[in-house]
Image (tube, helix red, strand yellow):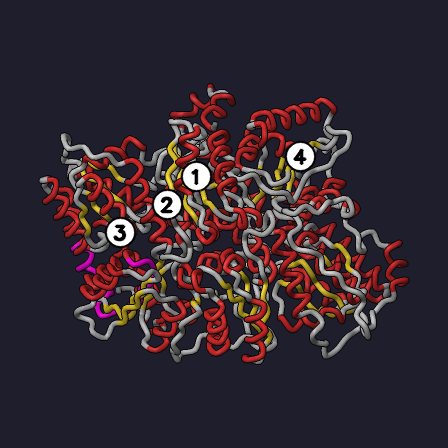
C-alpha cells in the first residue's frame, strides 16, 4: 500500500494522540515503540525492552521461550520442569507442535513431567527431589535424554540444577542437561530462546555423527511444526533431492540435533528464536545459514530457488522448478478464488518475533493490505535488519544471557571453505543476511512493538481492520469489539500454513473469518436504529 | 497414544506426570474477574499472568484481562515493591478500575515481598485514590492448587469489604459459587433462587465475565460481576451457601468470624440427590417453600433417569478433576446405577476424603485417589478397566489410548466449545448429564455393534 502524504500525516497524529493519552512516563516509553513509516526522518524502533509493570501485555517469560518454544517440541526426550506445577502444566501440548515417534519409537510430547515443588522444597532446597524425579522419569518413561527447565524459584533458592544434571547423567546413563530459564530473566520469552539455544549447543550439538551424508545435506531450523508446518515443507525438500540431517526443533529427535553440524546448509525460518544457534553453528562449524520463508507461495518458491542456487546443482535446480510448477498448478484454481474474495481486505498482524514479517508476504500475495504490524517479543534486528546488531547496546535488562563465543572446532572439517561461502553470499540475497520487517513495508505502515490492550482497542476503532491476526489472549478481546480475529501462533487449531497448500489453507481461514454469517447477527433488529445513531465517540467513551 | 505408560504401578515420590491441578494464581485471577470493574493483577513474572490468561481464554473463549508486575532479575534481587507501585499507578491511570485484585506468585513469595504493607503505604500516601480499592491474596504456586488460589482471593474480598450489620439480618443469603461453577451453573443457581423467591448476593459472579454476549461494543471490563456494595452487604445476610466446598469454605468461614454469618457447607449440587439436599437446606434456612415448577422439573428428571436407566446400570466409570466436581459427578453416577471404579482429585482435599468415603460406601473395591495425577489414573484404568471416563480435555489421551468414551467435565476444556454455557448443577444440569452420558454410551454401543446386531431400537 502506498499512502498519500495526507494519510501518513493522519497516522502520525494518531500515533501522537496515543502517546499523549497515556500518563506522561508511559507515553514517553510507548512513543519509542510506535513507528509510522514515512513519518519520522530517522525511523528507529525500540524493542526487546521491559514492558512497564501494570500494562496489559501479551508477553510471556523466559521459561515459556525456553521450555515452551524451543526445548518442548523435541520428541524423544522428557522435559522435566523443576518448579511448582503451573509452568509445566501450562506448557503441556499448548503450542500444537506435532510429532511422530522417533526412530527409537519414542514420543513424549503427550507427557507433562514436573517436580511439583512444595513449600518445604522452597525452604530446604529442591535438589534432592530433582535427583529423585530424574530417577523416576528414567525408570518410568525411559526417554533418550532428559532436559531440566528451571522456573522462577529455582534460581532464587540456589538449586544447582546443572550439577544435579551431571550427577544424574553419570548415574542413569542417558544424557541429562539443564536450562536455567527462570521466568523473571529478561523482558519476554525471547531470552528463553537464547538460553535454550545455548543449552543445546553446550550439551547436545556435535556429540553424534550421522550414519550417512550426501552432497545435499540440510538442517531445517526455527521451524516448530505447529499444526504440521514442517510436514508441508520437508517432503518438498526431499522430493527435490535434499537430505535432512536435523530439524530444530519441530518433530526433532535429540540425536538429530546432536548430528546437525554435519549438514552443508542450515535453513533458518524463525530468525528471532534461533539466530543464536545459527550464529554459533557458523562460529564453531563454519556451517552457513540461509534465511528462508515458507509462508506464502511466492516466498516458498523463492526460498526453494535460493536453496538450489546455494548448492549450484543443475539437477536440484531442475527438480526445484518442477516442484514449484506442479504445486502452483495444483493450487491455482483455489488461489484465484480466494484472491478474488480477499483483495483489498485490510489486515493487522501482531505476532511473534518473526511471524508478523513472514505473513506479510502471503497476505500481499492474496491481495490484502497490511495496515499495521508488530512483534510481541522481537529485537531491533527483526524490525530493521541484522545490520543494526552492532548498534544494539546490551542493557542489563535486555541482555541477561551472553552469546557463547566459539572458535572453529579443532579437527572439524567444514563442508565449505569460508571463501566458498563468501562467494555464495555475493550471489544470494538471504545467505547469512536478514533485512528485517520494516524494509518490506510500505510508506504509511504503522509499526508497533509490544502492542498492548489499550492500543489494540484504539487500532480497532480508528483503523477499522477487516481482520486482526494475533494470539489467543487478543483474539476474543478483538472479536468482542466486532472484528474477526485469527490466531497466528497456533492457527486456531487449523493450519498448516506453510508452503503452497498452506497458503490456500490460510486464505480459506481468513476468508472464513471475514465472511462468516455468524457475526452479522450481533446487533438485534430492534437495536439497528440505535446503532446507526451511535457515534464513534460514544463507543470510545464506553470503552474507556 | 501415551505409549510409554506402563501398566505396572510403581510408587513415585518426586515426579508428577500429567497433572490434573494447576497452581494458585489462576484460581485467584479467575475469582477476581467475578467483581465488577476489577483488574486482576499478578505480582510476579510476566509468564504467570500470560499463562493463566491463555488457559482461561482457551477454556472460555472470552477476553480475560490481567496485569503483571513484570519482574526482572533486579526485581528478584531487590524486591518487587517498586514494580508493584508502578503497576498500581499505571493500572489506575490507564484502566480506571474500581478494584485491583493483587495475587502473589512463587517468585514474589520466595523473595518475601510484603504486598499488603506496600499497598497500605500507597493508600496512606494518597497514591491510591479513595474510589479505588486494592485487595490482595497470598497465593504462592508451591502451596495448594488453583482451588486454594480461588479460595484465598474470595477470602480477601470478605476481609476487605464485608461489614457486619446486626439490624438487617434478612432472608437474604450469600452464595459463593466456587472455581467449578461455570457460567451455566451460576445462571442455573440464580434461576433456582429466583423460583424459590430467595433474595441473594452471589460472589464472585463470574457468569457474566466468562459468558458475555457478542454485541460488538465490549469495553475493557465485562458487564456484570459482583459490586463492592454487594460485597459489603454480605455481612448482613442470613447465611452463606458454599457451592464448591474446597473453593468457598475459607471465605464463608471468614464471613462467619467477621460478621457472624453462618456458613452452610453442602455437597456440590450435581445429580439429583445432592441437588435435593441443596434445595431442602435453602428452604430450611430461608423459610421459602419449594415451588411447584421446581418439583415438576425434578419429577421430569426422575422420569428421564428411569426411562434411560438400562443404559447406565452397572456401567463402570472413572472420574478425574477438581475435588468438588469429582465428588458431584460421583454422586450423579451412583444415582444412575453406575459403578464408580476410580475417582481421582488432583487437589488434595479433606472434603474429598469425606465425600468419597460417603459416596463409595457401597463400592468397597473402588479406588479413590486424593491428590493424584492422570498418569496414575491411566495406570489404574489399565489394571481395572472402565466403560466410561469423565474428566477434562487432558483425559482425551487416556480415552483414545484405552478406547473409552469421554464425557468432558471440569477444567480445562480446550477442545470443545461452549460447554461452560450449560449447567451440570441443579436438576437442569443433572438432566443434561443424563442425556449426555446416556447417549454417549449408546453411540458407543452402535459404533461397536456388528452389522447384524445394529438395531433401530435401543
Mark 2: few/some/many CA within 10 Å (<14, 14-19, 20+): many
Mark 2 or 3 closer to N-term?
2
Q: Which residues are magenta?
A: B302-323
x 65%, y 34%: residue: A34
Please name the residue that numbered disc 4 is placed on: A32
Q: Decide which of A340, B339 is in the foreground and name it.
A: B339
Please name the residue that numbered disc 2 is placed on: B137
Please name the residue that numbered disc 3 is placed on: B244
Mark 2 or 1 closer to N-term?
1
Disc 2 + disc 1, Cβ < 8 Å: no
Disc 1 + disc 3, Cβ < 8 Å: no
x 12%, y 48%: residue: B280
Q: CA distance from mark 3 to mark 4?
A: 48 Å
Mark 3: few/some/many CA within 10 Å (<14, 14-19, 20+): many
Mark 1 or 3 closer to N-term?
1
Q: Decide which of A455, B402 is in the foreground and name it.
A: A455
Task: Relative to A186, say whether A30 is above or below.
Answer: above
Residue B337 left/right relative to A528: left
Mark 1: few/some/many CA within 10 Å (<14, 14-19, 20+): some
Q: CA distance from mark 2 to mark 1?
A: 13 Å
Name the subunit of mark 4: A
Q: Which image quarter: residue A261?
A: bottom right
Mark 4: few/some/many CA within 10 Å (<14, 14-19, 20+): some
- Quadrant showing the C terminus of chain B: bottom left
Tell me if I can see residue B141 in this picture: yes
Amino acid at each position: 500500500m502506498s499512502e498519500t502524504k495526507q494519510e501518513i500525516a493522519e497516522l502520525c497524529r494518531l500515533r501522537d494522540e496515543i502517546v499523549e493519552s497515556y500518563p506522561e512516563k508511559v507515553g514517553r516509553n510507548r512513543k519509542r515503540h510506535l513507528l509510522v513509516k514515512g513519518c519520522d526522518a530517522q525511523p528507529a524502533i525500540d524493542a526487546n525492552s521491559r514492558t512497564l509493570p501494570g500494562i496489559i501485555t501479551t508477553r510471556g517469560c523466559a521459561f515459556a521461550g525456553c521450555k515452551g518454544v524451543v526445548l518442548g517440541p523435541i520428541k524423544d526426550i522428557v522435559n522435566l520442569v523443576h518448579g511448582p506445577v503451573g509452568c509445566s502444566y501450562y506448557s503441556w501440548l499448548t503450542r500444537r507442535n506435532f510429532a511422530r515417534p522417533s526412530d527409537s519409537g519414542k514420543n513424549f510430547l503427550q507427557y507433562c513431567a514436573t517436580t511439583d515443588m512444595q513449600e518445604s522444597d522452597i525452604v530446604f532446597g529442591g535438589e534432592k527431589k530433582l535427583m529423585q524425579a530424574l530417577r523416576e522419569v528414567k525408570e518410568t518413561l525411559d526417554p533418550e535424554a532428559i532436559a531440566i527447565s528451571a522456573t522462577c524459584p529455582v534460581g532464587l533458592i540456589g538449586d544447582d540444577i546443572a550439577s544435579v544434571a551431571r550427577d544424574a547423567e553419570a548415574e542413569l546413563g542417558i544424557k541429562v542437561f539443564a536450562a536455567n530459564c527462570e521466568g523473571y530473566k529478561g523482558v519476554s520469552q525471547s531470552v528463553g530462546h537464547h538460553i535454550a539455544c545455548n543449552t543445546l549447543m553446550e550439551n547436545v550439538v556435535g556429540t553424534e555423527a550421522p550414519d550417512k551424508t550426501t552432497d545435499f545435506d540440510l538442517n531445517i531450523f526455527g521451524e516448530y511444526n505447529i499444526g504440521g508446518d514442517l510436514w508441508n515443507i520437508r517432503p518438498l525438500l526431499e522430493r527435490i533431492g535434499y537430505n535432512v540431517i536435523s530439524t530444530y526443533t519441530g518433530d526433532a529427535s535429540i540425536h538429530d540435533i546432536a548430528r546437525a553440524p554435519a549438514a552443508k546448509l542450515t535453513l533458518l525460518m524463525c530468525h528471532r528464536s534461533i539466530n543464536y544457534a545459527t550464529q554459533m553453528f557458523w562460529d564453531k562449524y563454519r556451517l552457513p545459514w540461509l534465511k528462508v520463508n515458507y509462508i506464502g507461495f511466492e516466498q516458498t518458491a523463492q526460498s526453494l530457488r535460493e536453496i538450489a542456487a546455494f548448492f549450484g546443482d543443475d539437477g536440484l535446480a531442475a527438480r526445484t522448478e518442477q516442484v514449484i510448477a506442479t504445486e502452483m498448478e495444483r493450487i491455482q484454481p483455489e488461489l484465484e478464488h480466494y484472491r478474488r474474495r480477499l483483495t483489498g481486505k485490510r489486515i493487522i498482524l501482531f505476532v511473534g518475533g518473526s511471524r508478523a514479517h513472514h505473513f506479510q508476504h502471503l497476505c500481499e500475495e492474496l491481495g490484502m493490505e497490511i495496515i499495521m504490524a508488530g512483534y510481541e517479543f522481537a529485537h531491533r534486528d527483526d524490525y530493521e535488519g541484522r545490520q543494526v546488531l552492532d548498534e544494539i547496546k546490551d542493557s542489563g535488562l535486555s541482555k541477561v544471557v551472553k552469546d557463547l563465543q566459539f572458535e572453529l572446532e579443532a579437527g572439524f572439517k567444514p563442508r565449505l571453505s569460508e571463501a566458498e561461502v563468501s562467494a555464495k553470499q555475493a550471489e544470494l540475497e538471504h545467505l547469512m543476511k536478514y533485512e528485517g520487517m520494516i524494509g518490506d513495508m510500505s510508506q504509511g505502515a504503522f509499526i508497533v512493538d509490544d502492542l498492548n490492550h489499550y492500543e489494540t482497542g484504539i487500532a480497532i476503532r480508528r483503523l477499522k481492520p477487516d481482520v486482526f491476526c494475533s494470539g489467543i489472549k487478543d483474539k476474543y478481546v478483538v472479536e468482542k469489539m466486532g472484528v474477526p480475529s485469527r490466531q497466528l501462533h497456533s492457527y486456531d487449531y487449523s493450519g498448516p500454513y506453510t508452503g503452497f497448500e498452506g497458503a490456500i489453507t490460510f486464505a480459506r481461514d481468513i476468508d472464513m473469518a471475514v465472511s462468516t454469517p455468524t457475526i452479522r447477527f450481533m446487533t438485534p433488529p430492534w437495536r439497528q436504529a440505535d446503532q446507526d445513531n451511535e457515534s464513534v465517540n460514544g463507543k470510545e467513551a464506553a470503552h474507556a | 497414544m501415551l505409549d510409554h505408560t506402563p501398566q505396572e504401578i510403581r510408587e513415585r515420590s518426586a515426579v508428577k506426570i500429567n497433572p490434573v491441578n494447576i497452581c494458585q494464581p489462576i484460581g485467584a485471577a479467575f475469582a477476581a474477574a467475578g467483581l465488577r470493574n476489577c483488574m486482576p493483577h499478578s505480582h510476579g513474572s510476566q509468564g504467570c499472568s500470560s499463562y493463566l490468561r491463555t488457559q482461561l481464554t482457551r477454556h472460555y473463549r472470552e477476553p480475560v484481562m490481567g496485569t503483571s508486575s513484570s519482574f526482572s532479575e533486579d526485581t528478584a534481587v531487590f524486591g518487587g515493591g517498586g514494580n508493584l507501585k508502578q503497576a498500581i499507578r499505571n493500572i489506575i491511570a490507564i484502566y480506571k478500575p474500581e478494584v485491583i485484585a493483587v495475587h502473589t506468585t512463587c517468585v514474589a513469595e520466595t523473595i518475601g515481598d510484603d504486598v499488603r504493607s506496600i499497598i497500605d503505604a500507597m493508600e496512606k500516601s494518597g497514591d491510591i485514590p479513595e474510589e479505588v480499592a486494592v485487595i490482595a491474596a497470598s497465593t504462592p504456586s508451591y502451596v495448594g492448587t488453583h482451588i486454594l488460589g480461588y479460595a484465598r482471593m474470595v477470602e480477601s474480598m470478605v476481609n476487605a469489604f464485608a461489614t457486619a450489620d446486626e439490624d438487617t439480618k434478612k432472608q437474604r443469603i450469600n452464595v459463593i459459587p466456587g472455581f467449578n461453577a461455570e457460567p451455566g451453573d451460576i445462571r442455573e443457581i440464580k434461576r433456582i433462587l429466583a423460583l424459590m423467591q430467595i433474595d441473594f448476593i452471589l460472589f464472585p459472579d463470574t457468569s457474566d465475565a466468562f459468558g458475555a454476549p457478542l454485541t460488538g461494543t465490549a469495553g475493557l471490563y465485562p458487564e456484570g460481576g459482583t459490586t463492592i456494595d454487594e460485597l459489603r452487604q454480605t455481612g448482613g445476610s442470613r447465611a452463606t451457601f458454599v457451592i464448591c466446598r474446597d473453593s468457598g469454605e475459607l471465605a464463608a468461614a471468614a464471613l462467619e468470624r467477621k460478621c457472624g454469618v453462618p456458613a452452610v457447607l453442602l455437597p456440590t449440587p450435581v445429580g439429583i440427590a445432592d441437588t435435593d439436599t441443596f434445595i431442602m437446606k435453602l428452604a430450611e434456612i430461608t423459610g421459602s417453600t419449594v415451588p411447584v415448577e421446581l418439583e415438576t422439573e425434578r419429577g421430569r428428571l426422575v422420569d428421564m433417569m428411569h426411562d434411560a436407566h438400562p443404559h447406565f446400570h452397572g456401567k463402570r466409570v472413572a472420574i478425574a478433576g477438581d475435588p468438588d466436581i469429582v465428588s458431584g459427578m460421583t454422586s450423579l453416577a451412583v444415582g444412575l446405577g453406575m459403578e464408580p471404579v476410580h475417582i481421582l482429585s488432583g487437589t488434595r482435599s479433606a472434603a474429598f476424603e469425606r465425600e468419597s468415603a460417603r459416596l463409595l460406601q457401597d463400592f468397597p473395591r473402588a479406588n479413590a485417589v486424593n491428590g493424584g495425577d492422570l498418569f496414575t489414573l491411566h495406570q489404574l484404568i489399565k489394571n481395572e478397566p472402565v466403560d466410561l471416563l469423565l474428566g477434562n480435555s487432558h483425559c482425551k489421551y487416556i480415552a483414545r489410548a484405552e478406547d473409552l468414551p469421554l464425557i468432558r467435565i471440569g477444567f480445562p476444556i480446550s477442545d470443545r466449545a461452549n460447554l461452560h454455557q450449560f449447567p451440570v448443577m441443579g436438576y437442569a444440569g443433572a438432566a443434561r448429564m443424563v442425556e449426555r452420558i446416556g447417549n454417549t454410551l449408546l453411540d458407543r454401543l452402535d459404533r461397536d455393534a456388528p452389522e447384524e446386531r445394529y438395531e433401530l431400537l435401543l
